[in-house]
Amino acid sequence: MSSQKKILVIGSNGQIGTVLTKKLGQKFGFENVIGSDLRIPDIPTKFIFEECSVLNKEKLEEIINRYNISDVYLLAAYLSAKGEKNIDKAWDLNMNGLLHILNFAKEKKIQKIFWPSSIAVFGPSTPKNDVPQYTITEPTTIYGVSKLAGESLCNYYHNKFGVDVRSIRYPGIIGWESMPGGGTTDYAVDIFHEALKHQEYTCFLSRDRTLPMMYMDDAIQATIGIMGAQFDKIKIRTSYNLSSCHFSPNDLAEEIKKHIPSFKIKYKVDERDALAQGWPSSINDRHARNDWGWEPNFNLSQIVSDIILNLRNRYNK
Ligand code: NAD
């Protein structure tokens, strides 16, 4: 049997999956990366693609056996805003998808799992600033409830069955290569496209709603980093706090104006602002830094410069 890692990314068409599959392919070889999603991607992929729902356990098992999968990155989920409109489906996908993958690892069909949690596990009773790893977690969305339950499930499977599952509480993630899929921080991607196309953006979060955010490159680096760390370096098997920067829509707009001086932001707040109101403004991630050497590379001004540079290139083509 080959010792080469074989990787399955579930939810490979999504905001993070699109970029993660590319980076994993560059690192481990595209022939060793299998993407899967509900739908076939719009454009051909360099990696192998399998159309499959994570809720279809039989088909998933067949794919895992056929490719001799060792590592699974489980990204398929209902996100915060979408989840509030589909509570039953959000619970079903977010919990049963995870349970299937944990059971494959328990049965030794796969070796290692990455499963992301979110800052949505926190709620209004959590301290607002510099939120520690161990704190009050009383989420107010079904998304946050499912992520919190998922964290406990991962910890339970690790302690009881020795499953090597690794997790990060992602903050809001922004980048230029892919579009977001129904989260509360989607504004921070949309704003760049509108700024470049129309020099104007109407924001659904309020002006000063500061949230923890991260550049896609840093999120991918953390994801591949935690999966590459030695087994005994991963001391937290619920999910690690992770942080790079935090900003409000107004902070982001001011930074964009340095590149596009005519840019204007307007506000038309909707229900997503109430979801974000319960979340922290900033996160303390010292455990991730100490345990497996996490360190971010991008602050707000670097994020904005890089996104605008790349989107200008794309739109000019
Ligand atoms: P996304 O919504 O952009 O992508 C999810 C992908 O999963 C989509 O391509 C969708 O078609 C696919 N999918 C949905 N149901 C499926 C099913 N039954 N079987 C297989 N695939 C299915 O999400 P994302 O932003 O890429 O997020 C990925 C993960 O990261 C999620 O677990 C999310 O909770 C977590 N996360 C994301 C952010 C963020 O800012 N993007 C923040 C915190 C946590």
Image (spheres, rainbow, N blue to C red):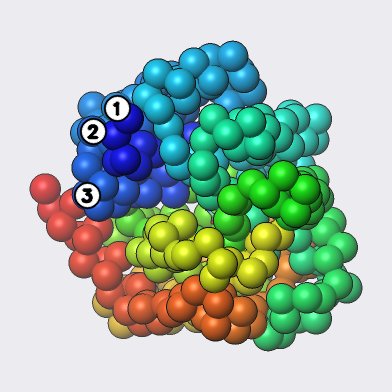
Q: Is residue 82 visible?
A: yes
* Circle 1: element type: strand
Residue 31's disc is 2
Question: Left or right: 65 with respect to 135?
Answer: left
Residue 308's disc is none
> Residue lying farthest front?
1
Q: Quadrant of the N terminus?
A: top left
Q: Is residue 300 visible?
A: no
**Could you tell which of marks 2 and 3 lies nearer the N-terminus?**
3
In which image quadrant can residue 42 be found?
top left
Q: Is residue 194 above or below residue 102?
A: below
Q: Nearer the viewer, residue 124 or 241?
A: 241
Question: Left or right: 23 with respect to 10?
Answer: left
For label 2, count other residues whose C-alpha is less than 10 Å away and answer few (under 14), some (14-19) or many (20+): few
Q: Which residue is mark 3?
A: 26
- Separation of marks 2 and 3 at Cα, in angstroms: 10 Å
For label 3, count other residues whose C-alpha is less than 10 Å away and answer few (under 14), some (14-19) or many (20+): few
Q: Which residue is mark 1?
A: 48
- Whether ligand 1 has any atom under 8 Å from the Cβ at mark 1 is answered as no
* Circle 3: element type: helix
Residue at the spot x=48%, y=47% of the render?
180
